[in-house]
Amino acid sequence: QVQLVESGGGLVQAGGSLRLSCAASIRILSSNAPAWYRQAPGKQRELVARITDDGSTNYADSVKGRFTISRDNAKNTMYLQMNSLKPEDTAGYYCNLVNVAVGARIRDYWGQGTQVTVSS
């Protein structure tokens, strides 16, 4: 059973910082394109940041220059460093891996989500 366990969310004032972590029960491969998504109440889930299979990073325009995605292969963990947080960053944040092979199956996996609340 593949598990993604997130941590690091919380309540922070605008302008503050948080670092989210997502620990995987499997080795994260480049082909898994580790990513962070977020979903605010009443809105669709949106991509925040992703590490592509060639190692480059993609960010939503709204977080460019403020958020940084990274991974630690030795710990099978991915991170999202969030700086200069704004109230509009308030959402549930979810980590994601794609193309995970488990036996004969290939599927995507999601973490359970961690809440980030930014007060003004």
Image: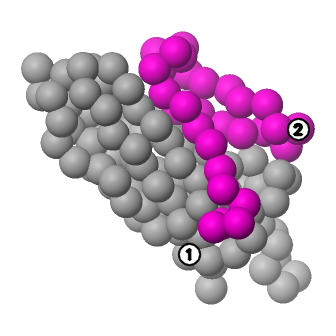
Q: Position of residue 49 (x, y in %)?
A: 59, 33
**Viewer-proximal residue among 16 and 50:** 16
Where's the N terminus, which quadrant?
Answer: bottom right
Q: Is residue 9 above or below residue 77?
A: above
Horizontal arrangement in the rendering, residue 99 relative to residue 76 (left or right): right
Residue most toward the left? 120
Query: Can you say whether 2 is above or below 87 in the image?
Result: below
Query: Residue 70's x, y, as percent?
Result: 62, 43
105 within the magenta span: no
> Coloured how?
one colour
Left or right of 8, for residue 96: right
Q: Residue at image x 47%, y 55%?
A: 21
The amino acid marked with disc number 1 is: Gln
Nearer to us: label 1 or label 2: 2
Most foreground residue, 97 or 9? 9
Q: Mark 2 points at which residue?
A: 54
Write down the region rendered in magenta. Answer: 48-76
43 and 38: which is toward the camera: 38
Q: Mark 1 points at which residue?
A: 3
Residue that appears at 83% across and 52% down: 30
Task: Give, as a three-letter code, the residue at label 2.
Answer: Asp
Q: Quadrant of residue 88?
A: top left
